[in-house]
Amino acid sequence: MVKSTLIVRASDALPLAASVDDEQTEQALSEHKQQAKLIFRRISPNSEPRCSIESGAYTLHYLIADNVIFLVITDKSYPRKLAFSYLDELSKEFQLSYGAKVDTVRKPYAFVGFDTFMSKTTRLYQDTRTASAAGASHLDKLNDELQDVTRIMTKNMEELLWRGDSLDRMSHLSTSLRSESEKYRRAARNINFQAMLRQYAPIGGVVFLLIIFIWWRFS
């Protein structure tokens, strides 16, 4: 289920709005909210616009749109498609309401009034069953890139914390290229093996028949 939502300006990580969480949720997610701040600091102009970062029992999903980062913390089992559908709804409404003011505000949480829309949308997406029903028409309108969740980069929080992993597109592209390169090498080895079989199979067949003939002739 949807646990908490944070909205910050991408250029300097200035908090713009956030969901109002109860004390129990605040305590349970305190570490993950600190991790969210780390993610905001790691994001650059070259970062992937959509990413899911797994951290223990939760996943942090973020969407970057129009110099704003929308991040939601959900249970790890919560469907990624619903998480990004939720973020997509927030981003569109936020752009309509405050888009022209994003680059000019100086104080944190300048758009606290957005909590009303966030709360209403969160209730729709709180449970996967109600979210699937209530958000069905919206999901149908999502573009192909958003619908294809396999294209959304997935990271592990440990990779970001301890290995200094990157959220950049080039890092993701490099990983993809390494994977494709390995596939190419395997395919090349397979082709070479098949070519060798085609080249030497006739000779092997002749030798085999010759051995059978000699064995039959002198046995």
Image (tube, rainbow, N blue to C red):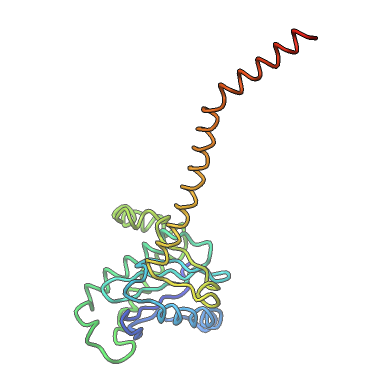
Residue sitting at the far top:
217
Looking at the image, residue 84 lies above or below residue 34: above
Residue sitting at the far right:
219
* Quarter-of-image position of residue 150: bottom left
* Quarter-of-image position of residue 96: bottom left
67 left or right, relative to 1: left
Residue 201 place in picture, x, y as percent: 57, 25
Q: Nearest the camera: 125 or 164?
A: 164
Residue 10 place in picture, x, y as percent: 32, 79
Residue name at image x 53 percent, y 72 percent:
159
Q: Nearest the camera: 112 or 56?
A: 56
Residue sitting at the far bottom:
107
Residue name at image x 27 percent, y 68 percent:
92
Position of the C terminus, as image quadrant, is top right
Residue name at image x 36 percent, y 58 percent:
135
Residue 23 place in picture, x, y as percent: 52, 84
159 left or right, relative to 133: right
Circle count: 0
Q: Nearest the camera: 152 or 123?
A: 152
Looking at the image, residue 33 lies above or below residue 57: below
Residue 122 place in picture, x, y as percent: 40, 69
